[in-house]
Image: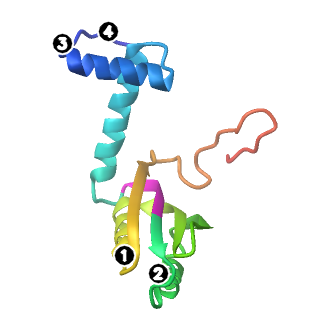
Amino acid sequence: MQRITISIDDDLLETIDRLTERRGYTSRSEALRDIVREAVTREQAASDDDTPCIAALTYVFEHDTRDLARRLTETQHEHHDLSVASLHVHVDHHDCLEVAILRGPVNTVRRFADGVVTQRGVRFGNLQIIPIRQGHGPGGHGHSHGPGGHSHG
């Protein structure tokens, strides 16, 4: 591990200290490492290429919008190869929340998500992309999930 020195203005340092305390980091270094990792992941996910990823697509839609639920279901079936799991929650009398866990190339996942969240009646949409290192995809990451856990390798 390398040790570096940085100059930072007082206001930004106060923000980092508040974040460090709120999230429970034991040091500024831990907080800054996570901030940098998050920025690197975000930068990798911003690429629109065929990098493998896992993603969470969350969206809220008005279930009363004509044919919307049917269109959303059809879109998911047309892209069944991307779908890992989904969750549907009735928020209130008008809105539903869905969370879709997706796996595939970044560009394909992003196109699918855009096709969902741009539907008339979808009021909110967010795509969180997490790039996957090569060899860490389905069946390829070979780690155990702790004592008594299952192995993928």
Q: Which residue in the protein does label 4 denote? A: 3
- Residue at the image point whose x is 29% and y is 17% from the top: 14
- Look at the numbered discs 2 and 3 and tell me whether their residues touch, using CB distance below 8 Å: no
The residues bearing labels 4 and 1 have C-alpha atoms spaced at a distance of 45 Å
Write the start and end of the magenta stretch as one range. 51-58
Q: Is mark 2 on a helix, strand or loop?
A: helix
**Going from the N terminus, do you reach mark 2 or mark 3 first?**
3
**Going from the N terminus, do you reach mark 1 or mark 3 first?**
3
Query: Mostly what secondary structure, the magenta segment?
Result: strand
Left or right of residue 20, residue 10 in this image: left
Q: Which residue in the protein does label 3 denote? A: 7
**Going from the N terminus, do you reach mark 2 or mark 4 first?**
4
Residue mark closest to the camera, 4 vs 3: 3
Q: Which residue in the protein does label 2 denote? A: 75
Of 6 and 21, nearer the camera is 21
Left or right of residue 102, residue 121 in this image: left
The residues bearing labels 4 and 3 have C-alpha atoms spaced at a distance of 14 Å
Q: Which mark is residue 105?
A: none
What amino acid is at disc 1?
Answer: Gly
The residues bearing labels 2 and 4 have C-alpha atoms spaced at a distance of 49 Å
**Going from the N terminus, do you reach mark 2 or mark 1 first?**
2
- Look at the numbered discs 2 and 1 and tell me whether their residues touch, using CB distance below 8 Å: yes
Residue 35, above or below 86: above
What amino acid is at disc 4?
Answer: Arg
Residue 41, above or below 137: above
Determine the residue located farthest toward the front in the rendered image: 93
Residue mark closest to the camera, 4 vs 1: 1
Of 38 and 106, nearer the camera is 38
**Going from the N terminus, do you reach mark 4 or mark 1 first?**
4
The residues bearing labels 1 and 3 have C-alpha atoms spaced at a distance of 44 Å
The residues bearing labels 2 and 1 have C-alpha atoms spaced at a distance of 8 Å
What amino acid is at disc 3?
Answer: Ser
